[in-house]
Amino acid sequence: MCGIVGILGKAAVADQLVDALRRLEYRGYDSAGVATLENGRIERRRAAGKLRNLELCLSQAPLSGAIGIGHTRWATHGRPNEINAHPHATEKLAVVHNGIIENFHELRSELEAAGVRFETETDTEIVARLVTEEMRHGRSPAEAVAAILPRLRGAYALAFLFAGEEDLLIGARCGPPLAIGLGEGENYLGSDALALAALTSRVIYLEDGDWAILSRRGFEIRDATGRAVKRPVTWTPKSGATSDRGNYRHFMEKEIHEQPEVVQRTLEHYADLTSSRVATLKDAPFDWRQLSRASIAACGTAYFAGMIAKYWFQRLAHLDVQVEFASEFRYRDAPLDPDALMMVISQSGETADTLASLRYAKSFGQPVLSVVNVPTSSIARESAIVLPACCASLPCRPGRASARHA
Ligand code: GLU
């Protein structure tokens, strides 16, 4: 899971874009890039590897545009190199993308047959080319984006910057999260509130199918049918805890060293160690004693954590638990028992496959409990009950996501 940021600012935005991307480093990435408008023309700086490579690039060839987009990439299609790094650009626009365009092959073959040339191996470039073709046929940026979104299958958060349009950014969401940040005479797009934490604490999360047109003075959100819609403004604490590496060289090192403290704080919070009793989850829409069984869906390290949890659930609670690779789970078309519980684990709370497992379980009526580090994340917001890990500065309070969202 990687990151998106967009800024409609008052002065040069390149440094702010990189700063916002740094706040998303905790999600992991393999390359990064930014694009701004320089006298109306799209200019990009991109680099494989860490953000400091991008900063080096910017220090050698600075950008001065007051509007721009930035991206940290975790490659799904195409090698993690500079050519494949986002933003992808044509003479008309630049775009950054989180997610996967599953039908990019068909779309690419169609455009190639019509003579369109591609520069990268990514699925994302198809989005840039499709919008460009629409604009060549006389459509405005917003019309062009509206025309191509229904053609995309898969998962995406997208942010667009257009040549010659100094006061326009467009964002779209279907799957991975995207939020609008509200400033004073400035507006922003970001993957989450953390990305925008240094810029604003007022954010609006787009819902699936939404797309938004932003200027410095306002914004408009449309749903998948093109209807103008309103989404609630969420106030988020200006906390940099999760996004700050502290004195550690990288996030993995930080997380390893934080484990004893986090485990201790979490145990103290959820269990009364003197009576050896576990706190009851007051808002839980299920009764642990009535559960027929439970599943845990997660990816990577969180999957291993799930295997430990399975051992403890079986041994201490005699509850039958199965641990699932979230990346495989929904493709099995497994019938699920509504009397069973789905538990999902994700550090960022944005792991796309884990979020898809959550939604799959909900479609069978299963209650979902999530364990996440980011209480404003998509997984937290879509779970019936959330157990945030007790990091030093994050609220450690189980709760129903809807209450927190409001
Ligand atoms: N699928 C796109 C790529 O491989 C985006 C990956 C991402 O979410 O960073 O470039």
Image: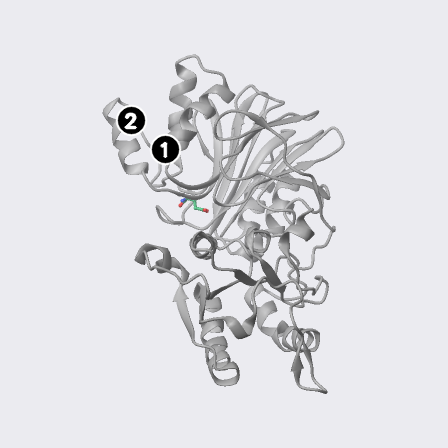
Q: Given the current orientation, which residue lies at the most extreme left position?
A: 113
Residue under the point 32% across and 55% down: 331
Foreground of the two, 320 or 132: 320
Cα gap from disc 2 to disc 1, whole angstroms: 9 Å
Along the line of sight, which residue is nearer the eye, 358 or 187? Answer: 358
Which residue is at 43% across, 26% downward? 90
Q: Amino acid at mark 2?
A: Leu
Q: Is residue 150 visible?
A: yes
Residue that label 2 marks = 111
Which residue bears the numbered disc 1?
126
> Is residue 386 shown left or right of residue 99?
right
Is 73 positioned to the left or the right of 333 in the image? right
**Quarter of the view holding residue 385:** bottom right
Asked whether 100 or 382 is in front, the reply is: 382
Image label count: 2
Image coordinates of residue 319 in percent, x first then y, are 47, 78
Is 313 on the left or on the right of 59, as rendered? left
**Label 1 sits on what residue type?**
Ile
